[in-house]
Image (cartoon, rainbow, N blue to C red):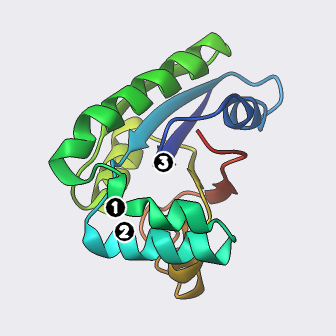
Amino acid sequence: MFTSVLMIEKALTSADVEFVTTLHGDEPVTFHVLLQPRGDQADRLLRAIDDIALGELDEAARENETPEGPQARSVGQQALDVSLAALRAAGSAADGRLIEDHPLDALKRLVDEVGADEVIVLTDPHYVEEFFHRDWASRARHKVGVPVLKLFSHSKA
């Protein structure tokens, strides 16, 4: 049995589920999912810059409509529940939790707690953070002690 910690920021799409559940061929995988709801105003600016870099001007203009902080918790819980159900429907064991503060500390604790074989960070592209190596995957590589695979979400959830 292979144990993966899957770090996400929104509900998994069907393409995402197929991708992560087939990474190890026929070997059974247990997923421990961490989802961090949307962040603060600084995150909104970075998301808008990413939207503009992708040519998605309408998305950039709507960033202020996205729930953040405590208001994002219920949306985050729904996204987590949908993702866990999809992973289980694909035949994988899956559990998960929301994280609100210090996502890399929560990631390190979970990796140690479950004896993870790997970490998969699956997000939309975050060009500004990636350029400065401040994205989750770049920072996790120095913290968790297991291989970290960075994947981009296949489509909008």
Name the element at disc 2: helix
Residue indicated by mark 3: 7
Residue indicated by mark 2: 44
Tell which circle, 3 or 2, labels the residue nearer the N-terminal end: 3
The C terminus is located in which quarter? top right
Tell which circle, 2 or 1, labels the residue nearer the N-terminal end: 2
Residue type highlighted by circle 2: Arg
Q: Residue at x 41, y 22 (%)?
A: 81
Q: Residue at x 62, y 11 (%)?
A: 89
Name the element at disc 1: helix
Measuring from the top left, give residue 43's x and y in whole percent: 35, 70
Q: Residue at x 66, y 49 (%)?
A: 153
Residue indicated by mark 1: 64
Q: Are marks 3 and 2 in contact (CB under 8 Å)?
A: no
Q: Are marks 2 and 1 in contact (CB under 8 Å)?
A: yes
Residue type highlighted by circle 1: Asn
